[in-house]
Structures are given as structure tokens and as C-alpha cells.
Amino acid sequence: MFNEYLDKAMRHARYEQIEDGTYFGWIPGFKGVWANKPTEQECRKELREVLETPSIPAEQKRKLVDALAARLNISKPVRNFLVVLIDHRRVGFLSAITKQFRHEINQRMGFAEADIISARELTPAEHSSLESQVERLTSKKVRVRYSQDPSLLGGAVVKIGSTIYDGSVKGQLERIKAALIAS
């Protein structure tokens, strides 16, 4: 289970080649988790080690958090929370904790969370239209995350909690195929 969280965190890692030609890598949402190495591959490897290896002393990780907290003006409660995660070797769970916290805040404030996956980039008008439809479905204000998946061929898939509304061409073709097989 722990490795699943690490894998998920690593899928969100970002890398940039900086002025000196080395690579700087970080994971959004994981304050204090970064690496700087000559190649992107080495950078990726070090990021993973920072997340999972207890051989990197907690004190070193705390110093990194303190330095970043000062530079980024991170509040003391957030800094302390990150240190608790470091001390209890739970940094790998930060992404899941953040996701659950966001979900809880949205629930308390009356927002529904939705993921909309489309085959292509949607226009602002299409965003508004889809958001209005989701708000009518949920009877709540909605916070939407958009992504693209060209394999959908057309249309969109809307995920609200555990409910999936599949209006994609791919989904329609799969339903037609299933109906033909069943008959």
C-alpha cells in the first residue's frame, strides 16, 4: 500500500532543466521534497529516495522543511505538520492526506468535486456548460478538475465521487459492442 502512494506521488513529479544544465525535480504538494541532479533519471531516483528512504536522516529533512518554510512563508502549523509526517515516516502519505483534507473542506462548504475528462481541449463555453450540468446533477456548487484523454475519441467522461457519467464516443462504442455480444 505504501508503494502505491509513492508511485502516485512520483507520477506527479515535475522536472526542469535549469541554467547550469542540471535537472531540478519536485512533487507539487510535497513541500520540501526536491532533487537536483545532472540527469532527469538521476533526479527521479533521488526524489523517490527522499520520499521513502529512512537512511536520509529525519533531521536533514526537517532542516529542508525549515529552509523552505522560511523562503516560501509557510505557516507554523503547516511546517509542524510536515515535521510530524517526517518524524513518523509518513511523508509518502502527504498526497493522500492533502486529497482527503481537500475533500473534507469541500464537503463542509457544500461543494461537489468533479473530474471531467475530454478527448480534446474544451472551450470556456464548454467548461461553463458542463459545470452548469454538473451543478444541476449534484445540487451543489462544483469544483472541477479538467484533463484530456485522446483515446476517448470524442465527448467526455464526468466523475463525481464514485459515480461516472460516460458520454464519450469510446464508451458508446463499448456499450454497442457489449450489446452485440449479448444478443
Image (tube, rainbow, N blue to C red):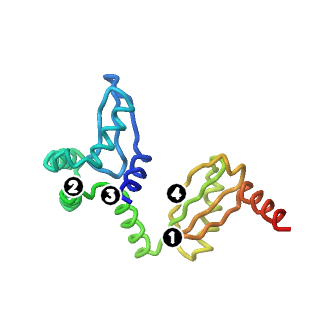
Mark 2 is on which residue type?
A: Ile
Residue 167 locus on image (x, y percent): 70, 61
Which dot marks residue 86? 2
Mark earlier in primary sequence (1, 3)? 3
In terms of image quadrants, where is residue 95? bottom left
Q: Foreground mark, 1 or 3?
A: 3
Label 3 sits on residue: 94
> What amino acid type should be assigned to the residue bearing mark 1?
Ala
Q: For residue 67, what is the image quadrant?
A: top left
> Which residue carries the number 1 mark?
112
Residue 60 higher or lower than 38, as above or below: below
Q: Amino acid at mark 4?
A: Arg
Disc 2, disc 4: CB below 8 Å? no
Please identify, in this view, whether the residue under mark 2 or under mark 1 is nearer the observer: 2
Could you tell me how many numbered marks the image carries?
Answer: 4
Is residue 68 positioned above or below 135 on the image? above
> Residue at coordinates 59% horizontally, 70% vertically from top-left?
163
At mark 3, the secondary structure is: helix
Q: Secondary structure at mark 4?
A: strand
Labels 4, 3: front one: 3
Q: Residues within 10 Å of mark 4 (few under 14, many from 20)?
A: few
Q: Which residue is mark 4?
A: 145
Sequence order check, earlier mark of 2 and 3: 2
Distance from disc 4 to disc 3, alpha carbons, whole Å, reads 20 Å
Residue 102: x %, y % from top left: 39, 65
Q: CA distance from mark 4 to mark 1?
A: 11 Å
Q: Secondary structure at mark 1?
A: strand
